[in-house]
Structures are given as C-alpha cells and as structure tokens.
Amino acid sequence: MNILAQAETSMVGNPLVNISIFLVFVAATMVFVIRASRTNKTAADFYTGGRGFSGTQNGVAIAGDYLSAASFLGIAGAIAVFGYDGFLYSVGFLVAWLVALLLVAELLRNTGKFTMADVLSFRLKQKPVRTAAAASTLTVSLFYLLAQMAGAGGLVALLLDVNDRATQSLIIALVGALMIVYVLVGGMKGTTWVQIIKAVMLITGAGIMSALVLWKFGFNISGLLGSAQDTVNGAVEGGRDILAPGAQYGINEISKLNMLSLALALVLGTAGLPHVLMRFYTVPTAKEARRSVVWAIALIGAFYLFTLILGYGAAAIVGPERILAAAGGQNSAAPLLAYELGGTLLLGVISAVAFATILAVVAGLTITASASFAHDIYANVIKNGDVDEKKQVKVSRITAVVIGALAIGLGILANGQNIAFLVALAFAVAASANLPTILYSLFWKRFNTTGSLWSIYGGLASVIILIVFSPAVSGAPTSMLPNMDFAWFPLSNPGIVSIPLAFLLGYLGSVLSSDKGNLAKNAEMEVRSLTGVGAEKAIAH
C-alpha cells in the first residue's frame, strides 16, 4: 500500500523509549564490531571471518542472515491482512531453505573460496564467468537491499508517527549509513556477530509474542483463527475469507499463475542467494558446515511457525483497518501487535529486534556485494589474480559505500511496499540468474562457458525486463509507481517465465558450443565438491 494514500494515525507507544532501546542495541553490537575489526588482517578475515566460526555459531548466524525484515514484518503483515495467501510466504521461504541446503550449500562451500563466482568459474573461463557472476550477485543484492531499506523506513515511520515522504527518506538514509559503518569497520566477523545477536533476539521475541497471543486465546488455535476471521470480516467491505486461498491473489487464471510464479521463485530462489551461500565459507570444515545446517533448520523452522500465530494474532487483536492506516502499512502489523500485548516496553523491544533484523541482513548483503566486486572483478578480472590483499580489501570497502548509497536510493523509491513482496522479487532474480548456472556447474559435465554466460545474462535480462514492465512497478494502486502505467506483462512475479528460460538458455548455450570443457577440471571439481578436499588449502593460499 502506498504510504501517501494511508490515513494518519495516532502515535504508537513512546518514541523516546522506542529509539532509546534501539540505540542500546546499536551501541552493544558496535562493541562487538569494533572488537572483531582488530583481527581483520587479511582478505580471508574480511570476507569470511578467516573461516573461524563454529558450526553452531554459523548456524545461528545463517538464521540471522536468512530471517530478514520480510520474514518478520512483511509476512506478519501479509497474513494479518490476507491470511492464507500471506502464509504462503512462510511456507515458500522455509521450503526454499531446505532446497538450498539439499542441493547446493555444502557443495558450494567445498568448492569455493570467497564468493559464488569461485564455484561458477572453477572449470570454465575465469574472466567472462566471474564478470557475469559478479553482475548477477550485485543485482540480487541490490534487489534484496531495496526491500530491507523500505522496511526500515516503514518501521521508523510507525514508531515516530512520521507520514511525510521526505522524513521517511531521511530515516532510510540514516539506516543505510549505519549499515555501511558496520561493514567498513567489522567485515564478515563483525557482521556475523551482529547476525548472531539479532537471531537470538528475533526468535526469542517472536516466541514470546506468540506465547502471549496464544495465552490471550486460552492456547486455543481454533479460537485464534476464528477470532481473526470475524475481525477481518467486520473490517473489510463484503467480507474476506482469510482461512482460504484467494484473498490476495484472487481465483481467476492470472491470479493462479501469479501465485504459482511466486511459489516457484520462493522455493528456488534461496539456492541462488549469494549472501546466504557465502555464510558457508565462514566455517573451517565440511563437518562444521553440516552442523550449521542442523542449527539453521531448527531455528528457521521454529520462527516460521511463529509467523502464523503472529499474523493471525495481529488480524484478531489489531485488525486490518488499523494496520493499513498505520504509517508503516502492512509492515506495521508486528509492532502494533507488540504494543497491544505488552505496551510501550514490548513495542520498544520488538522494534529494536526489527531494526536489528534489518541492520544484520543489509550488512550481510553489502559485504557480499562488495566482496564479489573486489574479489571477482578487481582482483581476478582486472588484476588477473595478482593483487595485494590490503588493496583488495580497500576496494571492497569503497564498493560497500557505493552499494550502500544505491540501496538508500532504491529503498526510498520502494518505501511503502510490502517487503515480503519485494524480497520475492529478489528471489525471482536469484533463481533466474544464479540457480541454473550453479546446478549445471555442479552436476552437468557438458556445461561450458557459453552455457554459463547465456544462462546468467539471459536469466538476468529476462527477469529484470519482466519486473520493470509488470504490475509490481506500474499500472496498479500497489505499484512502486502507482501514477504511471507501462505494464504489459500481467504477472507481478516473473519467476514462472524467467526461471525455465534461464535453464533453457544454459542448455542451448552448452550444446550449441564446440567447447567440450576441461576433463581434468571436471574431475577435480567433482571430488572437491563432494569431499571438501582442497578447500582448506585454497583458503590458506
């Protein structure tokens, strides 16, 4: 919903308390970031924390990285307003995580060094593939950053009762500046500790709120769902069934295709998200990587169960009218629910948790994007691998500033959109531009450089073109540009078209090319991806 079209609402909680709790969090995490920065001596330290984190630590950090503002603010809001259709985001994100782990996570960790491009270029031509992979990484990161920054604007708008666009834009800029400081000072070590702290806070906070909601309804889930349905029916003209599909996407053919396209992007997108995959480079062994997986699955699974209770709890206790009228729109459902359950103090804590969520994820995204440019483009394409590590880290830090500035600008543009929806677009880009090449590289010996370039650039171009000319950008009241209409593609999420197209282009590029690949490199990659032999040696050198 466009914030400019929302009605003004009374201030929620005490702004001084809200901001004070958040500042305490910032100060506490900055201590960890500064301490971590003292050991950032090499590129490996800056990009992967020197592979010095245990499986447990990394598993918690993975949960912190993956559970973004979309998971907390966006999904809770989508369920509160649309019910069943909103819960599809929770199901999609959880299933997507399992697919990513089963298909690619450990194989990528064993094969690569710092970035996704290390894997994609392992047995192919280095320069063109690294360039393409870096372009894709930067694009996915920017799309994901856009969602997180929009979430920051909506959250602070609610806490300070700020409805004018200019002030919200200033808030987004301040959050972006703080994000850049985290990355510049702490690198991956500092970012990881922020993600660990954030994961503990987020899952604990969501668990406490879920328990309070269930307590309010006598721990009767049926009573909760029934109350949510009654509240929404009374608030929405003509009623709305939030316990059945169709409230958000409708039941006509285009709506069904839209839902299928969204599901496809969500399920396949995580396996192509560079910032999630990069987390597996921070552990020393394949065994610790597997331990990371166990912890991450447990924490992420528990959290997405909480979102069902939080979303329907917000529908029953707060109501969709008040949620949509708040300064943050749909994204305000969780903070408003916290205020109803525990007053100003709980609102302040949950708001700090939401801010922690945004800062941790954007820091991870920024360091991934900057590492990709510095390691893949600068060090391996421009300098042919002959580069001083200090210079490489310096380029990475400069890139982080540029990426941060772009994220601020895009976040201001997307301010007011539901962030779960925006993240779904990032998943579509990742699934289209990255996943086909990752799977082909790991599992198809015939795959070659031409197929890789066709798949990455073709998938990237098709998904961006379809997004730009879709209702997500123009032609609808909920579009980023609601007063313009240049949409000719009918689906809000293009995954159902762009993902199969990218797979097809990768196949055609490979079979139509005379390049048969390098048999020795194929064998080396297969052994290394399955066993991890050579990964530790690569990081040491």
Image: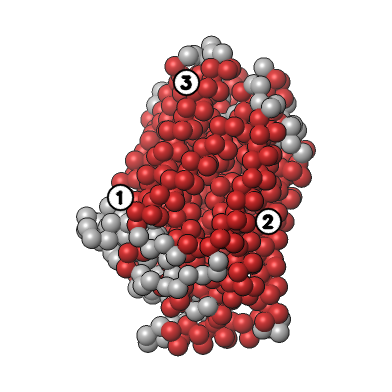
Secondary structure found at label 1 = helix
Q: Name the image quarter holding the N terminus.
A: bottom left
Residue 201: image tag: 2
- For the point 47% across and 82% down, the residue is 232
Residue 443: % across, % down:
58, 36
Residue 418: % across, % down:
43, 61
First reached walking from the N terminus: tag 3 or tag 1: 3
Q: Name the image quarter holding the C terminus.
A: top right
Kindly indicate the quadrant of the structure image that contains residue 248: bottom left
Going by the picture, which residue comes out furthest to the top?
386
What's the distance in space between the residues labelled 3 and 2, CA to CA? 37 Å
What's the distance in space between the residues labelled 1 and 2, CA to CA? 36 Å
In the image, 249: left or right of 46?
A: left
Q: Which residue in the protein does label 3 denote?
A: 378
Residue 468: image tag: 1
Residue type at numbered disc 2: Met
Going by the picture, which residue comes out furthest to the front?
16
Residue type at numbered disc 1: Val
Kindly indicate the quadrant of the structure image that contains residue 307: bottom right
Residue type at numbered disc 3: Tyr
Residue 302: % across, % down:
69, 62
Please state which of the two labelled residues, at mark 3 or mark 1, is closer to the viewer: 3
In the image, 93: left or right of 211?
A: left
